[in-house]
Image (spheres, helix red, strand yellow):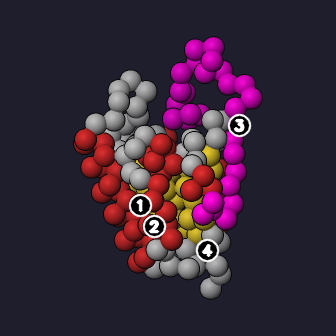
Amino acid sequence: MQTGYLQVYTGDGKGKTTAALGLAVRAVGAGLKVFIGQFIKGTHYSELDALKSYDAMIDVEQWGRGCFIKREPGPEDVASAEKGLDKAAEILQGGEYDVVILDEAVTAVKLNLISDDDLIATLLSRQPDVEVVITGRGASELIIENADLVTECRAVKHYFAQGVTARRGIEK
């Protein structure tokens, strides 16, 4: 049994979810079982199709109702995120998974869908051998303090600034 650590991928740049999914593929290659819970996301993303080929080793659930580019989060969004956090606690304590990725958990905190304290308490309640990865923009000091590894993805240049929208297979 190896020690599980808490990894955080944060920052304003592209690549947080992509890095977490890369780790999931690496884990599967080593025979580890992976759970991916996606906060906020509730729509189709191409990675969901790709992950189906790993369905014996990777389970995915979405706990969102869509992005908040065009609307503010509402009570239904809070309820969905809280339900997701409860499910994450079950998964982290259950012992079935070696790696747990909570995609956009940091963003869920930043948007006040879940609290910093509740997220940290959930993460710290995990089995000691479970590796956890959380992603999202704007990790709080509390999240950073409790993490074992923090990687910041920094935007240097992005074609989004020239009006390019998310492209199938690249950003979505």
> Cα distance, mark 3 to mark 1?
27 Å
Image position of 107 with respect to 164: above or below? below
Q: Which residue is mark 1?
A: 118
Q: Amino acid at mark 2?
A: Ala
Of the two numbered discs 3 and 4 on the same chain, state the one appearing first in sequence.
Answer: 4
Of the two numbered discs 2 and 4 on the same chain, state the one appearing first in sequence.
Answer: 4
Q: Nearer the viewer, mark 3 or mark 2?
A: 2
Q: Nearer the viewer, residue 155 or 96?
A: 155
Residue 95 showing in the rendered view = yes
> Cα distance, mark 4 to mark 1?
20 Å
Label 4–label 1 contact, CB within 8 A: no
**Residue 77: percent from the left, percent from the top?**
30, 42
Query: As drawn, which residue projects farthest toward the top?
Result: 162
Label 3–label 1 contact, CB within 8 A: no
Query: Which quarter of the rendered picture does the N terminus lie within?
Result: bottom right
Q: Amino acid at mark 4?
A: Gly
Q: Which residue is mark 2?
A: 121
Query: As drawn, which residue projects farthest toward the bottom?
Result: 1
Label 3–label 2 contact, CB within 8 A: no
Residue 57 showing in the rendered view = no
> Cα distance, mark 2 to mark 4?
16 Å
Residue at the spot x=49%, y=66% of the render? 123
Extent of the magenta region: 145-172
> Cα distance, mark 1 to mark 2?
5 Å
Of the two numbered discs 4 and 1 on the same chain, state the one appearing first in sequence.
Answer: 4
Of the two numbered discs 3 and 2 on the same chain, state the one appearing first in sequence.
Answer: 2
Residue at the spot x=52%, y=31% of the render? 168
**Residue 155: percent from the left, percent from the top?**
70, 32
Mark 2, other Cα within 10 Å: few <14 / some 14–19 / many ≥20: few
**Mark 4 secondary-structure assignment:** loop
